[in-house]
Amino acid sequence: MFFRKYIDFEGLLGDGEVMAATADYMGGGLGLERPENWKDVYAHFGLDIPSVRRRLLAGRKLEVPPYYNGGFVAFREGEIGQKKEQFGLARYQDCMSVDRAGIFPEWKSLDQVVLPVTIERLGVNFKLAPETINYNVRAHGSKSYDSAELVHYHQFNTIFTHHLPFGYEALENMEAVLDSKFLTEFVTQYGDELDWHSPKNRLRQRLMNSDGETLNSPTKDLEYLADKFGTDKGSTRHRYTDLYQLILEPYRNTRCNFLEMGLQGGWRNFGGEVAERPTDDCPSIRMWLSYLKKAQIYGLDVSDFSWFYDPRFTFYRCDMEERSQIATAASILPQMDVIIDDASHASHHQQDAFLEFFPRLKSGGVYIIEDLRRQPPQLEREGITKTGDLLYNYQITREFLHSNTKTQRAFNKIKDLIATCFVFQVGYRKEMPHQIAVIQRR
Ligand SMILES: C[S@@+](CC[C@H](N)C(=O)[O-])C[C@H]1O[C@@H](n2cnc3c(N)ncnc32)[C@H](O)[C@@H]1O
């Protein structure tokens, strides 16, 4: 388990109370989801199965007799409950007793099964802990859960596979508390438990070189930050950070203006108007703020991100379906050094935004368009030249060709402003479709 925040257990736990969180799911095999199967263990202590039922937090969300997450239980030292016993000792003894009685001969998690029984047997005041202080990455890791305070995982590997940002946060915490030798020790101790050989697991390469020496500041790489904040630009998906590290390093400590269009994934799954969807994170903006230490970061999106505050961040709301809104944004926002279009990926949005914003880039500035390969069918206009093909053809011939003559003319009109244009394919493999374009302004 690791703490993401300070938790005031003293304040949370009343006198004589025991606190635990409802379990996330039930280990299979014992059939404990059926209340009657608890009979033997309660009967072993001369108790009836309690009538109260609790709904498990994940999986099938079964309603079962009290069943708590055994990984974290809070109680005060000293004798408590009607029986005036020490809770820790009582729980241990109850486990041993159930074990010796052979009630669950095959079962390895007696401590968790016996926990509610000990609570009942001692007659302690029980307090249900919020999920935030026993947040199980295996059960809930895939959703963004910023309020998690105490994170629970079973093996190191779980935390890195189920919620990479939490894994990295744990590493950083340990690195901050222990000294730099920590990284070497960590790999030596737990290396085998982590799936070093998975091509997606870049952790080892970040922590050590092939001679087993600890690398300096691995936590400062852009890829590391992408994985940590949960944008898909890093090692887990698109690997744009390979390219960005190269292009953006010179901007790292400069007072540049940086704009990203499109701030949080998941918008396509929203049933209604994207503009109305709830938003609760902007991972790539957090990455840019962390990487570009002195930059003013601007974020543009049709959904509302005005709640996100940072003294170096400004949000601009704009629906890129409306060319006039893009034009207004381009005229209001300051001149940018870098612009990244990671918005809807619809070809006409990408092209309208380029036509409006590129001429306003600072001289030498860089314009990047992500995800050229896949356009959302619900937005894409029929027969339109894809932005990837448009730019790739320009890269080869220095001429823009477009299915719409007006758009073609507009692109050719600004081609003298282009210093250089590169289109990279998916995974930087030349046999793959166009994926990301980098265009520099003269
Ligand atoms: C791929 S996500 C951005 C991901 C983010 N940059 C990251 O790396 O985590 C795409 C974004 O485009 C936005 N978007 C979709 N349609 C849009 C439109 N018509 N105008 C502006 N933004 C739009 C969505 O609201 C969403 O935030």
Image: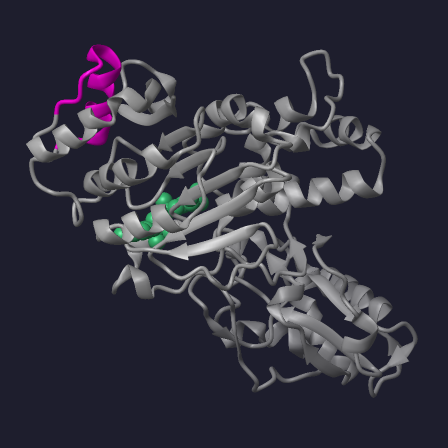
The location of residue 46, given as percent across then percent down, is 71, 82
Q: Does residue 387 appear left or right of residue 221 in this picture?
A: left
Residue sitting nearer the eye, 391 or 345:
391
The location of residue 161, given as percent across then percent down, is 54, 40
The location of residue 227, given as percent across then percent down, is 54, 38
Up the image or down, 86 lies above or below 315; here it is below
Residue 395 highlighted magenta (yes or no): yes
Residue sitting nearer the eye, 53 or 284:
284
The location of residue 284, given as percent across then percent down, is 49, 43
At x 40% / y 34%, what residue is drawn?
361
At x 75% / y 45%, what residue is drawn?
173
Regarding residue 266, the answer to whether it shows in the image is: no
Quadrant in the picture for residue 309: bottom right
Regarding residue 232, the answer to whether it shows in the image is: yes
At x 31% / y 23%, what residue is drawn?
417
The magenta region covers 385-401
Q: Does residue 39 appear left or right of residue 403 in this picture?
A: right
Residue 274 highlighted magenta (yes or no): no
At x 57% / y 85%, what residue is drawn?
52
Quadrant in the picture for residue 273: bottom left
Q: Main secondary structure of the magenta part?
A: helix
